[in-house]
């Protein structure tokens, strides 16, 4: 029989062993639970798409206009969503084809989202969306875009902003003569020129808008030639606006001492003394929503003309010192009506510049016609 000391030692050893067993079981349980938790999380992440996005723009990074608006908007969206992206600027048709082929090769044909918001890319997007049906494509809102399950087209309603800048210009300038340097002849130019002219003539019915086509978005020489032609023909002009993706018009206005209504080129910031306001694009909010829906497997083909209420078109750098209080009151009133969908720029009566009634009182132009087909200027507009 063991003495009391032996019994104490025996029970101490048993207690230690039991404690070690309990600790071991606890560690195993914790490890098992943690391991199972990790597996569940990893499975959830693995089942969720992580779409790779490529953006192609025909403009130049750093233009503070169309190209930068899309680049900044895309980066904002993919960073927010934790996605990877690839961006190329100064892209033409052939580069569009080549970049898409390389993107498909780099992603091993497993799919992705290719965004190419330019009229110049429509043919490329049509061809490649047919060739690569496992990829999603988003091109510019263009009637040449083909109907396809993996193809979407989009643009925004800049004409609302143009109308408002027309109102501001009407209050800021005494002369009835205004200039508009346009990029090229397409429905976008017609609706933006018309909207600006109607906003202008809402304030002063005697106003005239003289349009010159530069036939380019970026070529400095062609743009400067268009400006010279306008100013040579109408030296009395005291204000010019434009749809160019460079600051050539803003630069000219600054040195000529006349007013400029800028367009997405930071003219309202860099040439503030002579800039009345700036019509700009802001694509970040829209891209977050659109790319998120694609990433979650909810891509829908078709087209979308992004509403004014989305905030993807804005007025920046309003030069308040050049405007009377009534101009700002009028601007606020029209903006609020637009936000509430109670004001339509293309509501009748609207006459064209040949005196023909195009839209009767109480009627509106069909949005698809405005987007795809409009090819005439309103009353008060002439083209050099």
Image (cartoon, rainbow, N blue to C red):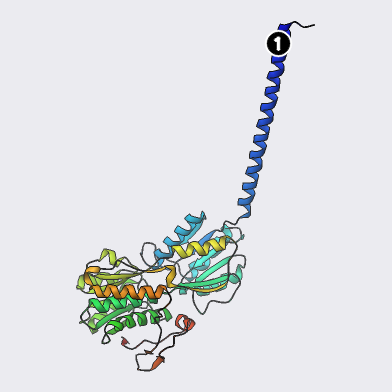
Q: Is residue 42 above or below residue 289?
A: above
Front residue of 252/14: it is: 14
Q: Give the residue at x 49% y 68%.
A: 116
| Residue 335 at x, y percent in the picture | 36, 73
Front residue of 35/327: it is: 327
The quadrant where residue 213 appears: bottom left
Residue at disc 1, secondary structure: helix
The quadrant where residue 178 appears: bottom left
- Residue furthest front as drawn: 4
Using the rendered image of the protein, determine whether residue 141 is visible from the camera's viewpoint: yes
Using the rendered image of the protein, determine whether residue 210 is visible from the camera's viewpoint: no
Front residue of 198/267: it is: 198
Dot 1 alpha-carbon crowd within 10 angstroms: few under 14, some 14 to 19, many 20 or more: few
Pick the quarter of the image with the N terminus: top right
| Residue 103 at x, y percent in the picture | 55, 61
| Residue 168 at x, y percent in the picture | 28, 75
Residue 96 lies left or right of residue 233; in this view the side is: right
Q: Give the residue at x 32% y 72%.
A: 332
Residue 149 lies left or right of residue 273; in this view the side is: right
Pick the quarter of the image with the C terminus: bottom left
Number of marks: 1
| Residue 175 at x, y percent in the picture | 21, 82
Q: Is residue 40 above or below residue 159?
A: above
Question: Can you identify the residue that label 1 sits on?
Answer: 8
């Amino acid at each position: 029989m063991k003495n009391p000391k032996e019994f104490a030692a025996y029970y101490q050893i048993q207690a230690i062993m039991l404690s070690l067993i309990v600790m071991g079981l606890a560690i195993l349980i914790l490890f098992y639970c943690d391991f199972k938790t990790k597996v569940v999380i990893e499975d959830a992440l693995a089942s969720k798409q992580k779409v790779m996005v490529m953006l192609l723009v025909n403009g130049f990074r750093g233009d503070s206009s169309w190209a930068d608006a899309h680049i900044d908007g895309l980066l904002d969206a993919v960073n927010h969503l934790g996605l990877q992206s690839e961006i190329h600027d100064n892209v033409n048709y052939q580069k569009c084809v080549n970049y898409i082929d390389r993107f498909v090769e780099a992603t091993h044909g497993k799919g992705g989202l290719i965004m190419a918001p330019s009229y110049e890319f429509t043919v490329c997007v049509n061809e490649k969306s047919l060739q690569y049906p496992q990829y999603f494509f988003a091109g510019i809102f263009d009637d040449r875009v083909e109907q396809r399950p993996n193809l979407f087209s989009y643009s925004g309603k800049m004409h609302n902003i143009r109308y408002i800048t027309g109102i501001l210009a009407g209050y800021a300038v005494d002369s009835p003569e205004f200039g508009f340097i346009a990029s090229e002849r397409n429905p976008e130019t017609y609706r933006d020129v018309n909207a600006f002219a109607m906003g202008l003539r809402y304030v002063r019915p005697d106003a005239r808008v003289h349009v010159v086509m530069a036939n380019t978005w970026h070529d400095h020489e062609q743009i400067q030639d268009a400006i010279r032609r306008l100013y040579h023909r109408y030296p009395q002009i005291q204000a010019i606006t434009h749809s160019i993706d460079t600051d050539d018009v803003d630069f000219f206005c600054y040195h000529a001492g006349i007013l400029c209504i800028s367009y997405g080129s930071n003219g309202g910031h860099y040439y503030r003394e002579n800039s009345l306001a700036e019509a700009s694009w802001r694509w970040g909010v829209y891209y977050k929503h659109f790319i998120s829906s694609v990433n979650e497997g909810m891509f829908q083909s078709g087209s979308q003309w992004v509403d004014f209420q989305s905030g993807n078109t804005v007025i920046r750098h309003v030069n308040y010192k050049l405007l009377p209080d009534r101009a700002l009151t009028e601007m606020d009133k029209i903006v609020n009506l637009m936000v509430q969908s109670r004001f339509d720029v293309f509501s009748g009566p609207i006459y064209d510049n040949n005196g023909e009634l195009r839209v009767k009182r109480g009627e509106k132009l069909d949005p698809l016609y405005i987007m795809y087909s409009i090819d005439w200027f309103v009353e008060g507009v002439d083209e050099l």
